[in-house]
Amino acid sequence: MSLRVVDPVRIGTEQLAGGRRLGWAEWGPADGVPVLLSPGAATSRHLGFGADALTGLGVRLISFDRPGLGASSPLPGRTFGDFADDIRTFAAGRGLDRLLMVGNSQGAPFALACAAAGVVGALAVVSGADEIAEPRFADALPGELRGLVDLAVSDPAAAEKVFAGFTAQAMWDMVMSGSPECDLAVYRQPAFEAAYRRALDEAFAQGAAAGYARDTVLAMGHWGIELSHIAVPVDLWYGEKDTGHSPDQGAGLAARIPGAVRHLVPDAGGAVLWTHAEQVLRTLLKHAPAS
């Protein structure tokens, strides 16, 4: 396992159309294979993974702040497609090709949008949020969550107002109260907790939770992503003790993506991105497009 988390070795912002900024952070060798990270809910670009494996694998890990979080400019009313366009613009501006991507937790549908748009050549979905607005999950969700999903579908603006009341502390408390013991053993490690909480604080640094709120409404609603059109390799990773990200641990999601491979990790929870970082990256690198 490669649990160590370290500060980025390179950090900055990219100018986008209309003067918006896209915050990014990098780890690993500057000439490595670019692996883009769409991070989890309400976490900033600063929370990377696989620190001990990147140099040996030749991986240049690049994480992003989605609009309205961290250092990235807000984009009210944005869509999954807008994120794919931002990543395409970033890659073109930096001269990056042969792109691979990892989507973690709530970052998963944004990464899937990139795969569907042909922005990346392969994708790893790790503890990915599922499309819980699908009717097949109607009886699988707790009552309070079911109500929030229904609101996100029927009145997205009202749902955004609800989620805009969240804070970094509220997010931390929710993760701590809803995680199995195997995940808490990771999250409570002092260095990891400090890095995680810093990423939460930075995600809310613009003084409001509007960025997180928009992310959550998009993730909880109907995605509108043509999953059946994805033409690149996709691996989905779920811990066998993780039922919080997907009620069926990605089985239905994998079935909707042509050729997708689902990995169910024994004795693991939602922290697979950190507990099995090297395994995830090695598998992803096998799909790297030829130079």
Image: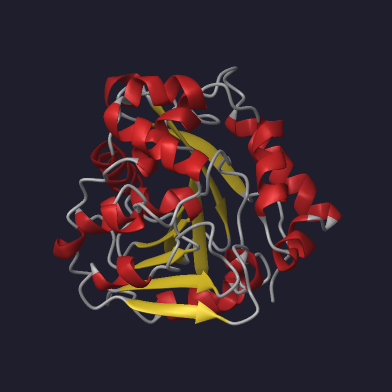
Quadrant containing the C terminus in the rendered view: bottom left
- Tally of numbered tags: 0
Residue drawn at x 49%, y 43% is 143
x then y, percent, for residue 269: 62, 68
Does residue 74 appear in this view?
no
Residue drawn at x 36%, y 56% is 137
Give the camera-side residue of 204 and 242: 242
x then y, percent, for residue 161: 45, 19
Give the camera-side residue of 158 and 52: 158
* 130 lies left or right of 113: right
x then y, percent, for residue 241: 60, 71
Quadrant containing the N terminus in the rendered view: bottom right
x then y, percent, for residue 44: 57, 40
In the displayed structure, would residue 282 be above or below residue 67? below
Scheme of image coloration: secondary structure
Q: Quadrant of residue 21?
A: top left
* 227 lies left or right of 177: left
Does residue 41 appear in this view?
yes
Q: Residue furthest left?
A: 229
* 66 lies left or right of 289: right
Residue drawn at x 32%, y 49% is 91
Give the camera-side residue of 45 and 238: 238
Residue drawn at x 63%, y 74% is 268
Give the camera-side residue of 220 and 67: 220
